[in-house]
Image (spheres, grey):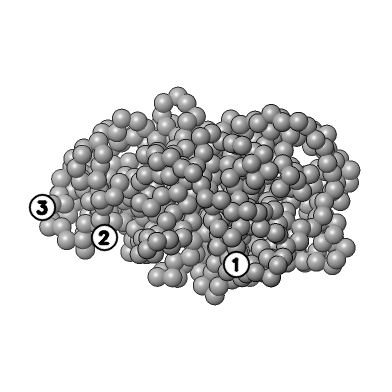
Amino acid sequence: MTTKINMISRMIPVFLTSFFLMGCQTGEAAEQLIQKEWETTSKERVSIHDPSITTIHEENQELFYVFGSHLAQAKTSDLRTWEVPFSHEYESMEDNIIYGNTKENLAETFKWAGYDDADSKGGYSLWAPDVIWNADYEWSNGDKGAYMLYYSASSTWRRSAIGLAVAKTIEGPYSYSDTVIYSGFTEKDSTDGSDRNTNYQNTHLAKLIKDGKISGFSENWSIEAGLTYNTDYAPNAIDPALFYDEEGKLWMTYGSWSGGIFLLEVDPATGKPMYPGEDSTTEDGRIIDRYFGIKLSGGYHQSGEGPYIVYDEKTDYYYLFVTYGGLAAKGGYNMRLFRAEKPEGPYLDAQGNSPILDKGEQNVNYGIKLIGNYQFSFQQMGYRAAGHNSAIIDENGQWSLVYHTRFNNGTEAHEVRVNRMYMNEEGWPVPAPYEYRGNEQVADALTEDEIIGRYEIINHGTDNGTTMLKTQMIEFQKDGNVTGDLTGTWTYDAGYLVLTFEETTFKGILLTQEITEFEQQKLTFSTIGDNNESIWGIKE
């Protein structure tokens, strides 16, 4: 199986005493834990799975924080060197820098999933958090403003929960506030192969229904006479990501495989979702589920996880990133890109297609594929399974793509990489071919003679491929033609590059990038095609 729960990197057991609890209550306003500053070690590289980036302004500079699965996190001021506050994942769980006494602090969530149960037997499964500053959050003592951390707790590939913890400083530790979304529940007493009773009465759904916030248990949520969770329709409640829209409304997108990616508006005072309450549909016919919210993509257990949405006020688009494939080195993990004019969607790819899947459809036909498995000839190591990204627009308006990647070395080791992104003429952010190393700019004043020549290129394609992509060679001719392994034409205007091959047009950016292997700057390009493919190139 290629779902998260079967991948080694999702679970590093921490052996603790067993406990068993059932039932659930709705959380109230949190009380602050004593805040502590991180003690860190400087590192050139950092290993954080599912990195989610956020930013603060401190001492006249922008500081970036990355939070990831398994209680791994770091901070950086330059996106190249890292201040790392942990030596191993799931460290000091009785006095953790993020959750304090984790077992006690998150006990309400662990009644359902994520601790010493099924696939988390003997330890924890805490994944893919996201942190956002919310000035309107209301504390129990009346104070306002909190960093809100949404975390994923999971025990099987469908029984999971998204929890909320809050702190007054970004480094925490974070106090438990509530468990806001559950998945894997059933209408009747049942089991998912574990010793847990998956009846929805053991989640907060029973109270939400009793209080009239949700209009009863939906027939869409379970199958097999109410004994099995309907993963063709309903999501796996992990991988939350928060964002503000242009009007200041707060939203959470989430989901992994199963029924797809969903979206909920969030109450800024509490950080809790504003559940629709009733089933309906969007204007374009997409599901609005009474509990799970608006469907954005996927379904029928096609791969798709780690959703992340960024609003760019310059283009006035909302950009949705989703990762397809399995997360192992040879699992075909790859990032896809869509955009919409409204936070609720519909989100479309470069071909104008929506990623909402019908039964039997394949997801490879939808989404701009950003990065496949690749290795330029000058690189000592190939890159595999780049994915579960976040993205950020910094104080200077510069985009950065932040993701974890594995390598073509026969292991499951992974590290964080940061690639700058640049807007092409069609309003799509294209990732630079080489990671950001500090000396990089759009090549917007080149002469024709500086551009012409031979380029090694990689076409990332559109499949969820598990093998390494082959490089090709092309040459930009003085007359505007392209020759070599691909034939067509090229044009350049103030940094913008347009390539045309047969009936496909690729639009992107020419860059000068500092390439570590060459110890100098090289001319590179990155383009996105109207067929959802991406082509990168580097000049010889």
Q: Nearer the viewer, mark 2 or mark 1?
A: 1
**Residue type, mark 3 in image:** Asp
Which residue is identified by label 1?
145
Q: Give the CA separation, mark 1 to mark 3.
A: 55 Å
* Whether residue 222 is situated above or below residue 47 in the rendered picture: below
Q: Please, what secondary structure does the residue beneath circle 3 have?
A: helix
Q: Nearer the viewer, residue 181 or 290?
A: 181
Left/right of residue 492 with respect to residue 414 in the rendered view: left
Among numbered discs 1 and 3, the one appearing first in the sequence: 1
Among numbered discs 2 and 3, the one appearing first in the sequence: 3
Q: Give the CA separation, mark 2 to mark 1.
A: 42 Å
Which residue is identified by label 2?
496
Q: Please, what secondary structure does the residue beneath circle 2 have?
A: strand
Q: Residue at x 59, y 54 (%)?
A: 35
Q: Give the CA separation, mark 2 to mark 3.
A: 16 Å
Residue placed furthest toward the left: 449
Among numbered discs 2 and 1, the one appearing first in the sequence: 1
Q: Please, what secondary structure does the residue beneath circle 1 have?
A: strand
Q: Position of residue 444 (x, y in %)?
A: 21, 61
